Image: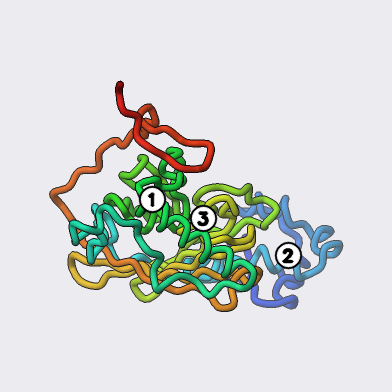
Amino acid sequence: MRIEGRSECAIPLLTGPQDVERCLAVPIVKPVDGCKAWQNAWSQSMYRKSGFKVLAAVLLAPLVPLHAQAAPHRGVATTDLNGIWERYPDPFADDASVFQDLQPPEGGPDLKEPYASEWRAQREKRAAMLAAGTPLVDSSTLCLPEGMPTIMGAIFAIQILQLPEQVTVLGEFLSQTRRIYIDDEMPPADELPPSYYGYSVGHWQDGALLVETRGVSPDVRFFEIPHSADMVIREKIYRVSNNQIADEIVIEDPQYLNTPYRFTFGYKRNDEHRIMEYYCDQTNDVIGSDGTVSMRVDQ
């Protein structure tokens, strides 16, 4: 963009206050090459009122490289997580384990008191009731979503759908859906309503998907482990091999935990499996007033 007779008024040549003054001090008789809009928008009076900083910021903006103007992304996805994944090693590989209650990874968390004693007592009670043939009711018995981080335990297969702006985890069990928003900002705590899966944001770094989750409701419990509304779940999801991935999970909750709870879930790809609809039907369950559940038997 140039003003007739004044080549120094070309926008790329405006690099300081002296250049802007020199350009504006010359009467503009005949705007050419699109200078009319510029002349109307930035007159001498505007320059003198607003100062050089405002004017220069606009005039010199084209000199800033495009990549410097755009909001930077933390990383680009170099790992393909798409596919259907099953827990590996399979926690139910032993036929006998099918009829046993799964145990929390790494033996459970390092809870503060009195939460540690209360949690151990509840786990012992659940094991004793199961052994007696009168298992206690749990969230799955009530057809409630597993929530975070239980969905990543993949009791049934999970499917990962990866897009540049979002990674979606579909759990076959109860047809669950979890969303991870890529390069998004975590909302303030008072804007996060308690939910089963919380709010998850992630970014790519060195081929791994780093995820932060907040806002999981205290009523949603992983192996009955108590937690506060301020619990934070961090994940590092990455490829182990061509057909295996891992999810390193760290749970932080200073109100309840002495130390962060760390464990890893492994998965193996199963291209032959197809996620099916899982509809939860309680018509055959009888939930007793003592908190036990049994199966209805027709008389």
Relative to 74, is 39 on the left or the right? Answer: right
Circle 2: residue type: Leu
Disc 2 element: helix
Q: Between residues 217 and 53, which one lies in front from this camera angle?
A: 217
Q: Position of residue 112 (x, y in %)?
A: 61, 73
User: x%, y% of residue 83?
Assistant: 24, 54
The first of marks 3 and 1 along the sequence is 1
Q: Secondary structure at mark 1?
A: strand
Residue most extreme to the top: 299
Query: Residue sitting at 23 percent across and 66 percent down?
Result: 89
Residue marked by disc 3: 221
Q: CA distance from mark 2 to mark 1?
A: 45 Å
- Residue of label 1: 168
SS class of the residue under badge 3? loop
Residue 55 badge? 2
Callout 2 crowding tier (Cα within 10 Å): few <14, some 14–19, many ≥20: some
Q: Position of residue 120 (x, y in %)?
A: 51, 66
21 over 123 or under it: above or below = below
Q: Of the two numbered discs 2 and 3 on the same chain, state the one appearing first in sequence.
A: 2
Task: Say which of marks 2 and 3 sits in front.
Answer: 3
